[in-house]
Amino acid sequence: MKIYGLNKTTLLDYPGHVAAAVFLGGCNCRCPFCQNGDLVLRPESQAEIGEEELFAFLKKRKGILSGVCITGGEPTLEKELGELAGKIKEMGYLVKLDTNGLRPEVVGELLEDGLLDYIAMDVKNSMERYGETVGLEKIDVGKIRETIDLMMASGIDYEFRTTVVKELHGKKDMEAIGEEIRGAKAYFLQSYQESQGVIAPVFHSYSREEMEELAEAVRPFVPCAQVRG
Ligand code: SF4
């Protein structure tokens, strides 16, 4: 398995836990606002970390860290994801998965095998604008809905989140997202931030006030919707 990065300590990625983040390369989406352009488009250009190095690190940090986030790219593309999650859990860590939700069959299998403690899924936009938002001409939004349903029925902790981009998300889109995840126990709106790694740096962000208004549009469906950051 190819591991393309390790964030040794993060307080932001696993709610309520001091965690490490493990980055897997490649993605089945091409979100133009993606912050990890190199990891998605050119994973081979990134420095690799051996599994041995990762597990030696986790062994040393037992008792200091409590969780490990498996992120990307899109981790569900990795054939050995279950094995990785299993080994991390065996060491006594909680495992969080970040996913774009396009591979419900993988998420379902991991859940069945009891390998996940937390899932964070990006709900990119209203189903109408999904393809445009993830940079794909064709997309099966049924897969997105399937992952949403799996997560909400899973009994484990989870969150949905949306990176909100001025050019891609309006009030109607946010309402439509709310309908898709009606009753979810956690939903966050995150403002788009331009950075060097963005695939297509042509977008803009909303002001804090505008973000709060968009969160308000979601609350009839998801009362706990919050602006993050
Ligand atoms: S934002 Fe996420 S889903 Fe979109 S291209 Fe980047 S890694 Fe893939």
Image: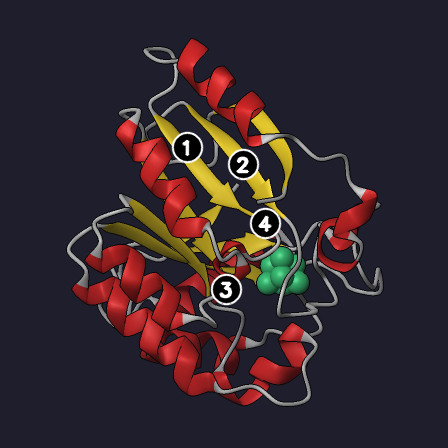
Vertical order, 223 against 134 (above or below): above
Residue 104, image quadrant? bottom left
**Which amino acid, mark 2?**
Val
Marked residue nearer the N-terminal end (2 or 1):
2
Marked residue nearer the N-terminal end (3 or 1):
1
Question: Residue at the spot x=48%, y=72% of the render?
Answer: 102
Q: For numbered disc 1, what is the local secondary structure?
A: strand
Question: Residue at the spot x=42%, y=41% of the render?
Answer: 84
- Look at mark 2 in the image and give the residue it sits on: 22
3 and 2 marks in contact (CB < 8 Å): no
**Which amino acid, mark 1?**
Val
Q: How crowded is mark 2: few (under 14 residues within 10 Å), some or many (20 or more)?
A: many
Marked residue nearer the N-terminal end (4 or 3):
4
Q: Residues within 10 Å of mark 1 (few under 14, many from 20)?
A: many
Q: Is mark 2 within 8 Å of ligand 1?
A: no
Question: Residue at the spot x=49%, y=57% of the render?
Answer: 79
Q: Which of marks 3 and 2 is in front?
A: 2
- Look at mark 4 in the image and give the residue it sits on: 72
Q: Which of 226 and 95 is in front in this view?
A: 95
**Which amino acid, mark 3?**
Asn
Q: For numbered disc 4, what is the local secondary structure?
A: loop
Q: How crowded is mark 3: few (under 14 residues within 10 Å), some or many (20 or more)?
A: many
Position of 17 with respect to 169 (left or right) is left
Q: Nearer the viewer, residue 87 or 152?
A: 87
Mark pair 4, 2: CA separation: 8 Å
Mark pair 3, 2: CA separation: 16 Å
Q: Does the residue labelled 4 lie within 8 Å of ligand 1?
A: yes
- Look at mark 1 in the image and give the residue it sits on: 68
Q: For numbered disc 3, what is the local secondary structure?
A: loop
Q: Which mark is residue 59?
A: none
